[in-house]
Image (cartoon, rainbow, N blue to C red):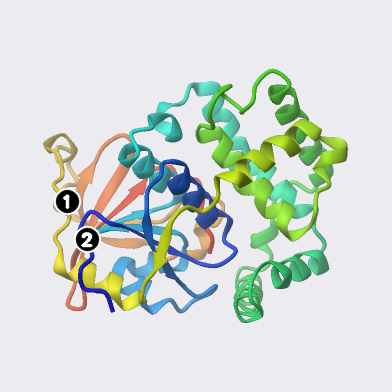
């Protein structure tokens, strides 16, 4: 077990085949950030992650730096953008029309792409994409969730074919004038958001984009070429020790002025899978217009700070 991990090193808690984990990995690769990787189970329980973030352990990925835990991929993307000094990778630096499109991709179009898959295509795709043990764990976990929440996992608009065509037609239109979806020379936040969902659907079932949406196909290949970056797998318990041996980062004074600071606080992720989660609980130690910072203290880990956006965009259950 490594004992020399610095409090500035990036640890990504991920599960195999998670599209949101791939998004984080691709962004880390694009910003040339070397990172450490902890592979979590495809379903609960996730004992190591539970020690660190409590009930949020139901969700993946989690980005850890020392004793600070960044939850939800929008928060993770913002942290990567800050570390890599590339603000255009964060939703905080997008115009209103781009934010609206990102919202539609996360809440409507992404679900439509998955809705195009039959149950058999979904199962077959997972066993093809990741090792059988992980695929089986994921499918068993999803089956339990489906029973528990009586179909809510797949609720939404049923006209998936029309929504998918609208989505790809819009991307194809944008790419008719640009190399990427916002810029002509490099990907920005909207590219990585769209890539997350298209990559996932294409892995589970070949979308045959070359024939119908050739510009989108070229764009997807360029995004694929970014790769998953340079990383090292570590023993999961090492991540716990890193948190235990470090203190959370300094919180700026402008984040400690709201009425709730210092009080017990709970927050439930409010994205499309938020209903599967119990609230994150702890002491509110930071807040601004964008995010909460929730302090969590346990005998096992000591003090960690959980960073989560007020408007969540996504993570895998």
Along the polypeptide, which appears first: circle 1 or circle 2?
2
Within 10 Å of disc 1 (Cα), the crowding (few <14, some 14-19, many 20+) is few
The percent position of residue 229, horizontal first and vertical second, equals 47, 52
* In this view, 53 is above or below 112: below
- Side of 172 where 75 appears, left or right: left
The percent position of residue 79, horizontal first and vertical second, equals 34, 44
The percent position of residue 154, horizontal first and vertical second, equals 69, 59
Circle 1 is placed at which residue position? 249
Within 10 Å of disc 2 (Cα), the crowding (few <14, some 14-19, many 20+) is many
Q: Quadrant of residue 263?
A: bottom left
Whether the residues at callouts 1 and 2 have beta carbons within 8 Å, the answer is: yes
* In this view, 155 is above or below 198: below
CA gap, disc 1 to disc 2?
8 Å
Q: Depth check: 21 or 267 in front?
A: 21
Q: Quadrant of residue 86?
A: top left
Viewport quadrant of the N terminus = bottom left
The percent position of residue 127, horizontal first and vertical second, equals 71, 73
Q: Depth check: 22 or 75 in front?
A: 22
Residue in view at x 31 percent, y 34 percent: 289
Tally of numbered tags: 2
- Side of 194 where 304 appears, left or right: left
Residue in view at x 86 percent, y 37 percent: 212
Q: Secondary structure at mark 2?
A: loop
Residue in view at x 73 percent, y 69 percent: 128
> Which dot marks residue 67?
2
């Amino acid at each position: 077990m490594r004992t020399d991990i610095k409090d500035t090193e990036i640890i990504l808690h991920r599960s195999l085949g998670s599209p949101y984990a791939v998004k984080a990995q691709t962004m880390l690769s694009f910003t040339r950030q070397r990172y450490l990787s902890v592979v979590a189970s495809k379903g609960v329980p996730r004992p190591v992650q539970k020690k660190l973030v409590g009930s949020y352990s139901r969700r993946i990925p989690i980005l850890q730096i020392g004793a600070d835990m960044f939850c939800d991929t929008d928060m993770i993307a913002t942290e990567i953008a800050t570390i890599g000094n590339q603000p255009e990778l964060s939703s905080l630096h997008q115009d209103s029309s781009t934010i609206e499109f990102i919202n539609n991709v996360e809440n409507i179009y992404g679900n439509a792409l998955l809705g195009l898959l039959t149950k058999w295509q979904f199962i077959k795709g997972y066993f093809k994409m990741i090792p059988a043990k992980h695929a089986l764990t994921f499918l068993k976990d999803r089956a339990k969730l489906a029973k528990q929440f009586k179909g809510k996992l797949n609720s939404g608009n049923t006209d998936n074919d029309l929504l998918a065509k609208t989505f790809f037609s819009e991307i194809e239109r944008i790419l008719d004038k640009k190399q990427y979806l916002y810029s002509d020379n490099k990907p920005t936040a909207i590219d990585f958001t769209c890539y997350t969902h298209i990559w996932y659907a294409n892995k589970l079932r070949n979308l045959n984009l070359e024939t119908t949406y050739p510009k989108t196909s070229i764009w997807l290949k360029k995004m694929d070429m970014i790769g998953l970056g340079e990383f090292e797998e570590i023993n999961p318990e090492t991540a716990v020790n890193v948190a235990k041996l470090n203190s959370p980062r300094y919180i700026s004074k402008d984040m400690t002025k709201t009425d709730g600071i210092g009080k017990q606080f709970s927050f439930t992720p409010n994205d499309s899978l938020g209903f599967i989660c119990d609230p994150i609980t702890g002491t509110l130690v930071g807040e601004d217009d964008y995010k909460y910072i929730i302090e969590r203290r346990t005998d096992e880990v000591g003090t960690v700070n959980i960073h989560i956006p007020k408007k969540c965009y996504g993570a895998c259950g």
